[in-house]
Amino acid sequence: MSDASTKPYLIRAIHEWCVDQGLTPYLAVAVDGRTMVPRSFVQDGQIVLNIGPDATQSLVMGNELIAFQARFGGVAQNISVPVDNVSAIYARENGHGMAFELASGFEHEAGEDAPEFAPDGADDAGPGQEVSTESGKAGLRSHLKLVK
């Protein structure tokens, strides 16, 4: 019997914790060909998604895939994200959450190293929209625990 990954369970637990605390759960995702997101919102091979109850419909957080509907620019979109591509889940308001190491050799669309992410600027992003990746990297990392 092979050991199941703890990653999808941790993602669900932090999502539940955020919602229970009245916080907004954000999901940082490395985008590749298996990731179904609006490409116009992808920046530097990543996207940050608001996965709070007010921003999503029909959210399903499975062991292999996270799927839901969200509005981007007022247009409903079907979103599908492989759990393997999730690099972090955290609360928008305080940056508390967890970061995950991506599989070695992971290459996203831009062909760069694993993406950086940050909650700063999150107040500017609406439901299902990305967050700036240029500021606050150290602040987010100080709150997140890296899981391999």
Image (spheres, rainbow, N blue to C red):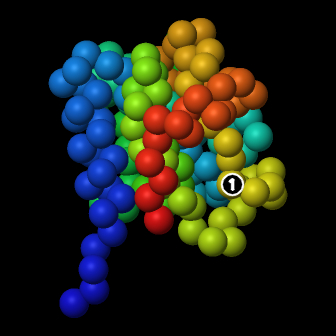
Residue 33 on image: x %, y %: 64, 57
Q: Tell whether 1 sits left or right of 43.
A: left
Q: Is residue 68 shown above or below 95?
A: below
Residue 48 appears in the rendering: no
Residue at 29% over, 39% down: 14
Residue 37 appears in the rendering: yes
Residue 24 on image: x %, y %: 37, 21
Residue at 80% over, 55% down: 112
- When asked about the image quadrant of residue 132, the answer is top right
- When asked about the image quadrant of residue 108, the answer is bottom right
To which residue does mark 1 refer?
114
Residue 39 on image: x %, y %: 68, 37
Q: Is residue 74 shown above or below 2?
A: above
Nearest the viewer among 78 and 109 is: 109
Q: Is residue 38 shown above or below 8?
A: above
Residue 38 on image: x %, y %: 62, 34
Image quarter where the N terminus lies is bottom left
Residue at 68% over, 54% down: 114
Q: Is residue 110 shown above or below 93?
A: below
Nearest the viewer among 50 and 6 is: 6
* Secondary structure beneath label 1: loop
Q: Tell whether 10 sits left or right of 26.
A: left
Q: Tell whether 45 sits left or right of 1.
A: right
Neighbourhood count class around disc 1 (C-alpha, 10 Å): few under 14, some 14–19, many 20 upward: many
Q: Residue furthest left?
A: 20
Identity, as a three-letter code, of the amino acid under mark 1: Ala
